[in-house]
Image (cartoon, grey):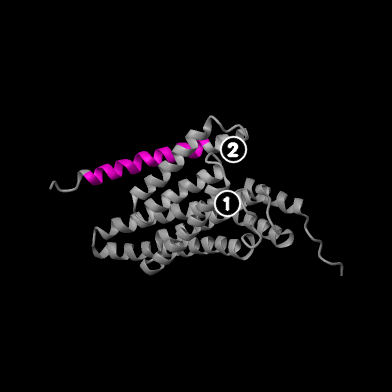
Amino acid sequence: MSPARIISREEYLLLAKVAEEAERYEDLVTQIKGLTQTYGALTIEERNLLSVAYKNMTNALRNSWRVVDSLERLEQSHPTGRTQRQLALTRQQRNKIERELTDVCKDAIRLLDDRLLLNVTAGEETVFYYKMKGDYYRYLAEFAQQQERGRFSDLSLAAYKFAYKHALASLEPTHPTRLGLALNFAVYYHDVRKSPERACHLGKHAFDEAVACLDHDDDSSLQAMRDSMMILQLLRDDLVIWSGEMQRGIESLPNK
């Protein structure tokens, strides 16, 4: 019996790209896992594919969770006998989505801890992976019960802080990975810590620093600059929303 043929790196990458085109993101993750188990550290293209896969898997589940959670809250506001049965079924569906989302998030974190972060190089790669770790702990914190929510929130914060400290020291203010980290870290403060003030402070600092450097950044590629501009637009949109929330909060305070 002939030994099993080892799949080359190029073949793993081809299969991953085919899976992405077919929107089979679980298969994409499987191919990248096989690649890193066989060949070690990922290239920028390979890790971007992995990020796309996990992002699409979790986005679909997070959107489903929000819809079902809203339906459950709506049914809770109409406590009838018929609605109690509907509520139980809706809660059952929400729990199913939560289990699936938990599995995907923990799978991403496990891959980071067990493989990708073991031999990570300083600079952009470190920022990328620790940002990713912060993201998936943040997703877990969004729907976890109180005790677990606090634990996941703390783990997310620790990953984001490590990534942000490293980004400030090693990446230009206009670098898309640094800007993407700032955006997601600010979202963490707003959505998980319920602090629009801290979200605005972090987001505005990152936005202002990047804008100040735009005219002097001649080293970035056209694609990197496009990515940075897109993130800056998202950051600006969020800052407008969060600033409005803060203003409404001030206006709602009783006059002394």
Instruction: Pinpoint residue 215: horizontal percent, then vertical percent.
Output: 53, 29
The count of marks equals 2
Cα distance, mark 2 to mark 1?
15 Å
Instruction: Pinpoint residue 165: horizontal percent, then vertical percent.
Output: 51, 53
Magenta segment includes 235: yes
Magenta segment includes 65: no
How dense is the environment of label 1, judged by Cα within 10 Å: few (below 14), some, or many (20 and up)?
A: many
Q: From where the camera sits, is residue 57 visible? A: no
> Can you name the residue that lies furthest to the right here?
1
Q: Residue at x 24, y 58 (%)?
A: 78
115 on left or right of 96: right
Instruction: Pinpoint residue 144: horizontal percent, then vertical percent.
Output: 40, 64
Q: Which residue is mark 1?
A: 128
Could you tell me which quadrant the N terminus lies in? bottom right
Q: Residue at x 27, y 60 (%)?
A: 76
Q: Nearer the viewer, residue 165 or 239?
A: 165
Please name the amino acid that badge 2 sits on. Ala
For the magenta stretch, what is the residue range? 229-250
Q: From where the camera sits, is residue 143 visible? A: yes
Q: Which mark is first along the chain, 1 or 2?
A: 1
Q: Secondary structure at mark 1?
A: helix
Q: Secondary structure at mark 2?
A: helix
Instruction: Pinpoint residue 33: horizontal percent, then vertical percent.
Output: 66, 60
Q: Nearer the viewer, residue 134 or 67?
A: 134
34 on left or right of 79: right
Predominant SS of the magenta segment: helix
> Can you name the residue that lies furthest to the front here?
169
What label sits on residue 224 in the rendered view? 2
Q: Nearer the viewer, residue 53 or 216?
A: 216
Q: Residue at x 36, y 67 (%)?
A: 146
What label sits on residue 241 in the rendered view? none
